[in-house]
Amino acid sequence: MPTRPIDNLRALLAGQTPEWIPFSLDVGAAPGLSEPVLENFRRVTGAEDPGEYFKADVRLFSLKTRFGGDDPAALHGAVEPGTTFDEWGIGHWAGGLPGTTDRTYPALASARSIGDVEALPSPIIEVDGDMSPIQRHHDAGYPVFGYAGSIYEWSWWIRGMQSFLMDLVSEPELAEAVIRKIAGHTRRLALASASAGIDVLCFYDDAGTQRNMQISPELWRRFIKPAWRDVLDAVRQAYPHVKFFLHCCGKIDAIVPDVIELGFHILHPVQPECMDFGETYRNYGREIVLTATISAQQIFPFRSPEEVRAEVRRLAGIVGADRRTILMPSNVIQPETPWENVVAFADEACR
């Protein structure tokens, strides 16, 4: 019987050599094609699901969440027309351009006390929806990746980056209240996702710029790392078979050992603009699955299809016969990306 993608990935995550290098067009559990690229995919192929069409090795399913209060707009003053609100009540304005976010409105921008933080409604997780796609994907032999939350990234989104970074230094109790609020929801979402049968919980927590960390490694270890440990320990205790994917953009060399210590199984993206995949793989490739990513900033939008193929081959050559990686975009494939480059990546990654 041929090896199924779910078994191939399980071998990889168990520290073994998979039969082939898995690949995905997505960014963990986040769809990898921006809306304009997805519309082009539908127009060109007549298909709906890029993963199925390109025979990718993973499938996606995430629980839905929604704002826990009555009116998220009431958290804000004046906002731009067309602003949408997420499960935390954060406002997002795209400026009329599809596939982008031009401005955000933090839900706790005006918070002055721990009580203000605690008063914000936590998102509601919809656990009574149709979960049958998970079983359908499993029956077809595919692992399921699902969105499971954030800690640091959501903390500054909900408070505002400048305010949150200042809080870490000047108002640590307020910062801890924000982190506690966020981590509590992430724990609940992760446990509910694992209970639904999702194989790989995907967390998103960008902590780097392309030059260095956004906050010092010491602050990250003091405030963010313990919160992640609590979340992952809760899931491990209840669902020891579930695996953890962390998306963390930027130059985060300083905390890669901490990510490994916490017990994440997959690290994405090892960002090509600021981290060397070969060096990182030599240092840590036996301790964690490091994704081999094609740059969504430079290669996907601005290189030729043959250069895309060459980059896939280069990355595969670094891991060699060990095949201990997953080929993925470094981030969402942007609207200006030529369609031929998407096809080139998927075709070469399948070889």
Image (cartoon, rainbow, N blue to C red):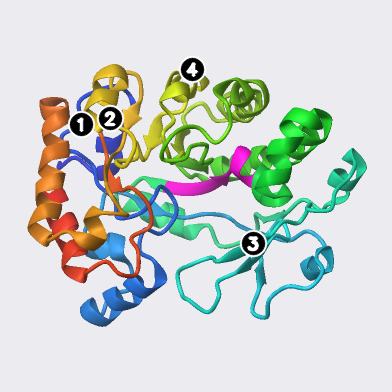
For disc 2, the neighbor class at 10 Å (few under 14, some 14 to 19, many from 20) is: many
For residue 83, side relative to residue 69 (left or right): left
Q: Is residue 203 above or below residue 281?
A: below
For residue 11, side relative to residue 180 (left or right): left
Q: CA distance from mark 3 to mark 4?
A: 33 Å
- Residue at x 89%, y 47% (from the top left corner): 116
Question: Mark 3 or 2 closer to N-term?
Answer: 2
Question: Mark 1 or 4 closer to N-term?
Answer: 1
The label nearer to you, 3 versus 4, is: 3
Q: CA distance from mark 3 to mark 2?
A: 38 Å
- Residue at x 29%, y 41% (from the top left corner): 272
The residue carrying mark 2 is 12
Mark 4 secondary-structure assignment: helix
Which dot marks residue 135? none
The residue carrying mark 3 is 104
The residue carrying mark 4 is 261
